[in-house]
Image: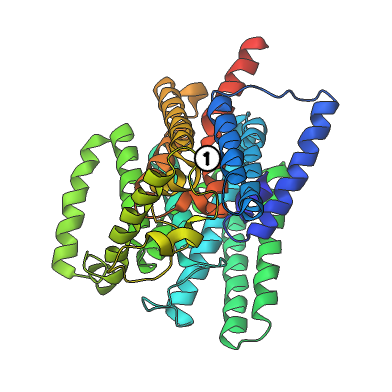
Amino acid sequence: MAGVAATCLVSIFAAELFLAVALAVYLARLVLRQTRLARLPLDGPILAFAVWTLLSASFSRDPVVSHESAKKLLLFALLYLAADAMQSEDMRERILDAALLGGVALATEALIQFYALGYNTLNQRPRGFLGHYMTMSGLLMGVLVVAAARLAFHAGPWPRPSRRDLQALVVLAAAFAALTGLQAADLFALEGERLVVAALAAAAGALAVTRGPWPGTSARVLLTGLAAPLSAWALLVSRTRNAWIGAVIGLGALAVLRAPRTLWLLPGAAALLLIFRPAPVMERLTLNDPSSRDRYFMWQAGIDMIRDKPVFGQGPRMVEVVYPEYRWPGAPNPTTPHLHNNALQIAAERGLPCLAWWLWWVAAVMGDAYRETRKGALGTGWVAPAALASVAALMAAGLFEYNFGDSEVLMFTLFISALPYALRRERAALAAA
């Protein structure tokens, strides 16, 4: 599970490979009665969402393509695996360390691409190790919120980095310096990225299973302290507005939960933007660009798709196929892979009932995360707020992007969404003991 947590930020292939192994291990543990399949409050909406998705695929104009797309439902197994793996505080912290390590790697690669490899224009934005800058920015948004939650709810003194912490930091910097050289020379660049992903997976496993004086609290604080500013910096240069909005909402949710007075920083930040007017930000603060106008036409077409097929929708992966039939005159682009809005995309693809199941799932996760936040379960005060703020960020960004359809973003969200239920399982185990 630590491997999944780290690699879902850098490689979907590696993350799904680790997920398959984790699922096999979990099934073996069930057979050996070393664990049990606990029921979650999300069982109902997840089952309904899955069944309706398969029905929608069966009624689409191309059932084969739609059912092929529906295999992404298997990723929801991650929710149950994560809730099982993180039901002790020690393992929870170690696995989340692995996730933040992946976030540091993703943000570092994005910054290298922006400053050293020419990914610094609106048409060529940094994408990290991933295939698209939208996926990268959605993940950086989640990493920023999780890291900020851990820092905001940290209790006790801040330990200084140890010598081994600094040595590990030097090794990480050397690895990325070597990768940058390979990429700049266009020499074994892909192989270099794969080696970094493999090393990251090995480091995540070591974080999860190592028992000893290191890594300790100082390494954890250093890792989190790196993840927050690096992900914020990389998110800024990504020029991705939906992720900016999501990050602001997620951080605002943390502020409300932890220190509401810090919300006064928002108008201060807005004033600084108006004073300094940084180009990467100001050029994106507009509604007159082609992508903004195209979203308006996409959403109108999506509403028409829903009106035509409100029950089962057009079918998974069919929005791109039928869009030319529904495209409004004046739309800048003749085609689109999706409607850049979670709710509209799900309703247009799978029907209004499926949208209702999805909203039920989101509301259940956020409600349970809020209840665990109020309880301050087991003294681990930061993980439930992290889950609540992360899902809030996903929903806010999802008003302008179909981030629920990104496998990497979905995996990270499911992973973080399992935190409230891991806390519940831990509390139930302690009560039974």
Above or below for 25 versus 170: above
- SS label for mark 1: helix
Report x, y in % for residue 265: 21, 48
Which scheme is used to colour this image of the protein? Answer: rainbow
Q: Is residue 57 left or right of residue 333?
A: right
Q: Nearer the viewer, residue 318 or 410?
A: 318
For the C terminus, give its image quadrant: top right
- Identify the image quadrant of residue 170: bottom right
Q: Residue at x 37, y 56 (%)?
A: 243
Residue 207 can be seen in this image: no
Q: Is residue 279 left or right of residue 34?
A: left
Amino acid type of the residue tagged 1 in the rendering: Ile
Find disc 1 in the rendering and name its residue: 416
Q: Is residue 112 left or right of residue 1?
A: left
For the N terminus, give its image quadrant: top right
* Identity of the residue furthest to the bottom in this view: 185
Q: How many marks?
A: 1
- Identify the image quadrant of residue 216: top right
* Identity of the residue furthest to the right in this view: 32
Report x, y in % for residue 47: 59, 30
Report x, y in % for residue 345: 43, 49
Q: Residue at x 70, y 75 (%)?
A: 191
